[in-house]
Image: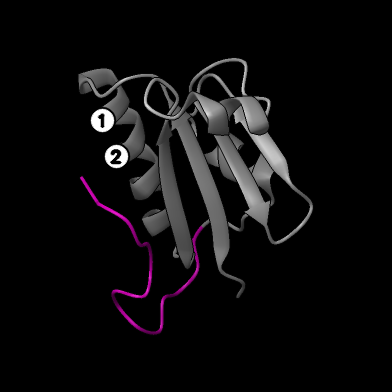
Amino acid sequence: MPKFQLTLFIAGKNAHAERIVSGVHRMMVNAAAEYELTVCDILEEPQIAEKEKVMATPTLVLSSPPPCRRVVGDVSDPARVLSYLGIPSGGSRSEPGRHGTGKPP
């Protein structure tokens, strides 16, 4: 199974943004997917948002494996988000703890 490279663009560090980050981590863990999630606060790093042409938050970008895909806005429906990104939902994890990098909630 490939390692999924994701970037989540948020605006500010607040309770709403933390729920979104937590939800994306939970979605990927429940999908039993190996992933790396980078969180980018566009208020702190506007140059990255401009380079990536992010116009709204939250925006979840799958950059690898190709094709690159984006979910803009509501990322609260895991089945819909995983389906659109082409990430299989569920599955068995052979090694616990191999999922996710970055700061879990």
- Looking at the image, residue 26 sits to the left or right of residue 59; the answer is left
Q: Quadrant of the N terminus?
A: bottom right
Coordinates of residue 18 in the picture (x, y in percent): 26, 30
The 10 Å Cα crowd at callout 1, few under 14, some 14 to 19, many 20 or more, is: some
**In the drawing, what numbered circle is on residue 18?**
1
The correct choice, above or below, for 68 with respect to 91 in the image is above
Q: Amino acid at mark 2?
A: Ser
Q: What residue does disc 2 label? A: 22
- Name the foreground residue: 6 vs 92: 6
Q: Marks 2 and 1: CB-CB under 8 Å?
A: yes
Coordinates of residue 3 in the picture (x, y in percent): 56, 69
The correct choice, above or below, for 58 with respect to 93 in the image is above
The correct choice, above or below, for 38 with respect to 97 in the image is above
Q: Residue at x 68, y 25 (%)?
A: 53
Coordinates of residue 33 in the picture (x, y in percent): 49, 64
Which residue sits furthest bottom? 94
- Tell me, yes or no, if residue 76 can be seen here: no
> Which quarter of the picture shows residue 4?
bottom right
> Which quarter of the picture shows residue 17?
top left
- Tell me, yes or no, if residue 67 can be seen here: yes
Which residue sits furthest front? 47
Count how many numbered circles sit on residues in the image. 2
Q: Amino acid at mark 1?
A: Glu
- Secondary element at tag 1: helix
Q: Residue at x 61, y 58 (%)?
A: 88
Q: Which residues are magenta?
A: 90-105
**In the drawing, what numbered circle is on residue 105?**
none
Q: Is residue 53 magenta?
A: no
Q: Residue at x 47, y 68 (%)?
A: 34
